[in-house]
Amino acid sequence: MWTQSLFSRFQTNRMFSVLCCMAFLCAAAIPELQAQRRFDQSKELGLALGTGYYLGDLNPRKHLGGRLNAGVGAYYRHNFTSRISLRANFFRGQIEAWDAESSDAWQQNRNLHFRNEISELSALIEVNYLEHRMGNPGDRFTAFLFTGIAAYNHMPEALVDGIWIPLQPLGTEGQGTTWGESRGLKPYATGGVSVPFGFGFKANIGPFMALCFDWAVRKTWTDYLDDVSGSYADALVLQQENGELAMDLADQSLLQLGGDSNQAGMQRGDPGRSDTYGFLSMSISFRISKKPTTCWVQPS
């Protein structure tokens, strides 16, 4: 697993490098805000359709890996200038992955799976590469970068006899048991804060509508989007204190390592790597301020 650890450190460094670049772009655009006597401000409402995915123990490397499911969202965008916007964004999407569909033999033998419905509310700063005003014939298209802060909630589930069962209350790695307490394990939170960063494209499709595509990943501080993090719990303790279902869902290995049906303390996941989730979406936004006939170019 040392290769995964190196990959994780590379991913983290790359994430923070991108954030620093975005912060620089935002800082460089501030003089434009200060220099204008009158802002070409406008407001938009948008509806989005897309999908979600994640990077973690069941999908360690592949962006847009795992099973992709439909997600929906909506947003309000305030354009302070033709370059800088603030977006209040809501998106609800599902991430899902199965060890059985991995090309890695160790994962196939582990044989875990999950799905997780994530609801996110975020505040995002967008910086356009080119000037863009909805409805202006001269500003038809631009790419943009964005970053911000988000709050999300989640609940990983596993499929049992056609029914999806919430996993966090079961404490599948020993949370909530005497075995887990002796190792400092507590039930993980089903909500948290993440840092989104990504890029997108906007294109006018009329005097008051625009088409938008964006793709962003979210840096989190949890390793439990997939309910997998550290080691197998003691199966007997898990059965006695959290129930038969918790024991069954904690260890679904096809072949127990060492031939022992109780794999207590053996590796189940990579605790040194936090999970990441992402949303890919396409949306249509509608201008809710300024008439289409309004002149966008303001005198200095």
Image (tube, helix red, strand yellow):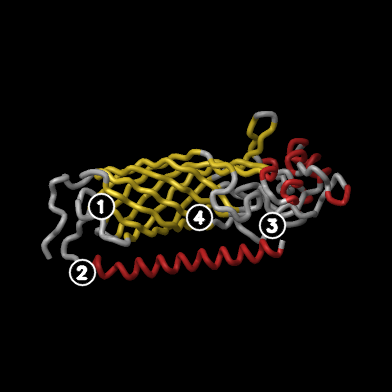
Front position in the image: 111 or 74: 111
In the structure shown, which secondary structural element does the residue marked by tag 2 occupy? helix
Which residue has dot 2 on it? 35
Q: Earlier in the sequence, mark 4 or mark 3?
A: 4
Q: Quadrant where the C terminus lies?
A: bottom left
Mark number for residue 140?
Answer: 1
Query: Is label 3 or label 1 in front?
Result: 1
| Residue 155 seen from this side | no
For the point 38% across and 70% down, which residue is it? 24
**Mark 3–mark 1 CB contact (< 8 Å):** no
Binning the other alpha carbons within 10 Å of mark 1 as few (below 14), some (14 to 19) or many (20 upward) gives: some
Alpha carbon separation for disc pair 4 and 3: 19 Å
Question: Up-down: is 18 above or below 140?
Answer: below
For the point 13% across and 59% down, which residue is it? 298
Q: Earlier in the sequence, mark 2 or mark 1?
A: 2
Which residue has dot 4 on it? 218
**Residue 73 placement (x, y as % from top left):** 41, 42
Alpha carbon separation for disc pair 2 and 1: 24 Å
**Residue 242 placement (x, y as % from top left):** 75, 40
Residue type beneath disc 1: Arg
| Residue 231 seen from this side | yes
For the point 58% across and 48% down, which residue is it? 65
Which residue has dot 3 on it? 270
